[in-house]
Amino acid sequence: MTIEVLHQQDVDQVVEIIRQANQIVADQFGITADNNPKHPSLYTNDWLLADLARGEEYFVYKHNDIPIACVAFEQPRPNAAYLNRLSVLPTYQQQGIGKALVEHIVSYAQEKDIGSISIGIIAAHSELKSWYITLGFEEGVTKTFAHLPFDVTYLRLRLTED
């Protein structure tokens, strides 16, 4: 296994990883193109390229040189980062790959002297929330957005003291 920065030749596969991994969540929570057209289950190459153009960085987990998972890192402020689009192909889930990618982002953020990493998840996704908490994230506020068919809970991992 290796974790690498996204290479151009892997863009199509990474988009498919994001779509497949998030389709499970879309099915579970009744998310469709009609009620949430920007959900990752509908991800496109154009969206990924727009993320990259904004400065978001993608890391790809490869098994036998084949991409099977990914995560995105965004740094909106000097001392804060977002962990985005953590996605593992369904056949490889529950094998510690997601945890390895989170740990990679944590190490990357520490190298950049970032104080905290945040993530937003579907508030009702209690299993995912519990998983992030076991990785050291703390539950924060839950917000309602008019354009989303679910509430969003924010979680934060402190890397340094405030």
Image (cartoon, rainbow, N blue to C red):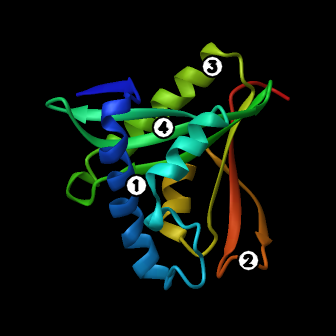
Give the residue at mark 4.
102
* Quarter containing the N terminus: top left
Q: Which badge, 2 or 1, comes first in the chain's sequence?
A: 1
Q: Is residue 88 found left or right of 1 in the rendered image?
A: right
Residue type at mark 3 is: Gln
Of labels 4 and 2, the one closer to you: 2
Give the residue at mark 1.
18
Residue 82, position as x, y percentages in the image: 66, 41
Q: Is residue 78 found left or right of 99 in the rendered image?
A: right
134 relative to 55, above or below: below
- Alpha carbon of mark 3 to alpha carbon of mark 1: how far? 25 Å
- Alpha carbon of mark 4 to alpha carbon of mark 1: how far? 16 Å
Which residue in the rendered view is the most extreme toward the right?
Answer: 162
- Alpha carbon of mark 2 to alpha carbon of mark 3: how far? 34 Å
Give me the residue at 62% from left, 35% from top: 53
Q: Which badge, 4 or 1, comes first in the chain's sequence?
A: 1
Q: How crowded is mark 1: few (under 14 residues within 10 Å), some or many (20 or more)?
A: many
Give me the residue at 65% from left, 31% from top: 55
Q: How crowded is mark 4: few (under 14 residues within 10 Å), some or many (20 or more)?
A: some
- Alpha carbon of mark 4 to alpha carbon of mark 2: how far? 28 Å
Q: How crowded is mark 2: few (under 14 residues within 10 Å), some or many (20 or more)?
A: few
Q: Which type of secondary structure does the marked residue at label 2 adopt?
A: loop
- Alpha carbon of mark 2 to alpha carbon of mark 1: how far? 21 Å
Q: Which badge, 2 or 3, comes first in the chain's sequence?
A: 3
Of labels 4 and 1, the one closer to you: 1
Give the residue at mark 3.
110
> Badges 2 and 1: C-beta atoms under 8 Å apart?
no
